[in-house]
Amino acid sequence: YKSCAMMLYSLIDGRLIRLQGGPKTEKENLESAKKTKRKPARYSGAAAVNRINNKYNEVHEDDIKAWFFSNLTRENLFCALAVLYANGNDFKEQPAVMNRNFVDHGMLHRKVRRMDCIQLFLAYYNFLTFENRLTAEDRKELKGIV
């Protein structure tokens, strides 16, 4: 199941990266590099999860009561992704729930179980569902994360 888990983590990461849009134009890169003094990049893993969730909340902060079920589903998805992509803390303590950093870096002491893969399949499916529900305007806003 370890190879299955690693593939699912890479599929989720790919969707997180693509949702942020492509690299900016050369002019935008130069302007942002002058301001931050570092090369702009698209985020992956926990940073991408946090940035996409924060940006979505920022755009839809007035819609929370009107879209209760949708927001509850999204909140559950991003909480699950935050656990799956949590910081490894230098691999000092083994996680109770499988973690991408531990699996992909070979630091998970226990075997990857069938249940771990089922959880990842559900997270991937729910992320694809979330992505399909995004409007064109939402996608435009989320691509402005970088």
Image (tube, grey):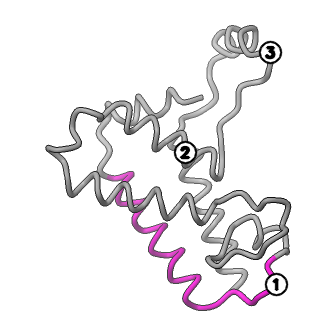
**93 up-or-down from 88: above or below:** below
What amino acid is labelled 2 in the image?
Answer: Asn
- Tell me the amino acid under the disc marked 3: Lys
C-alpha separation, residue under disc 2 versus residue under disc 3: 22 Å
Instruction: Inspect the magenta stretch and tell me whether residue 112 lies in it.
Output: yes
Q: Which mark is residue 50?
A: 2
Q: Which tag is nearer the camera, tag 2 or tag 3?
A: 2
Q: Quadrant of residue 26?
A: top right
Residue tagged 1: 109
Residue bearing the label numbered 3: 37
Mark 1 and mark 3: span between their CA atoms?
A: 39 Å
- The residue furthest front is 93
Q: Residue at x 71, y 57 (%)?
A: 87
Q: Quadrant of residue 12?
A: bottom right
Local SS, label 2 = helix
Q: Main secondary structure of the magenta part?
A: helix
Circle nearer the N terminus (2, 3): 3
**On the rendered image, what quadrant is the N terminus found in?**
bottom right
User: Residue 81, position in %: x, y?
Assistant: 53, 61
Dot label at residue 94? none
Figure check: 9 above or below 108: above
* Kind of residue sitting beneath label 1: His
Which residues make up the magenta segment? 108-132
Return the x and y of residue 62 as percentages of the image width and height.
23, 32
Q: CA distance from mark 2 to mark 1?
A: 27 Å
Packing grade of label 3 (10 A; few <14, some 14-19, many >=20) is few
Q: Is residue 21 left or right of residue 4?
A: left
As helix, strand or loop, the secondary structure at mark 3 comes to loop
In which quadrant of the rendered image does the C terminus lie? top right
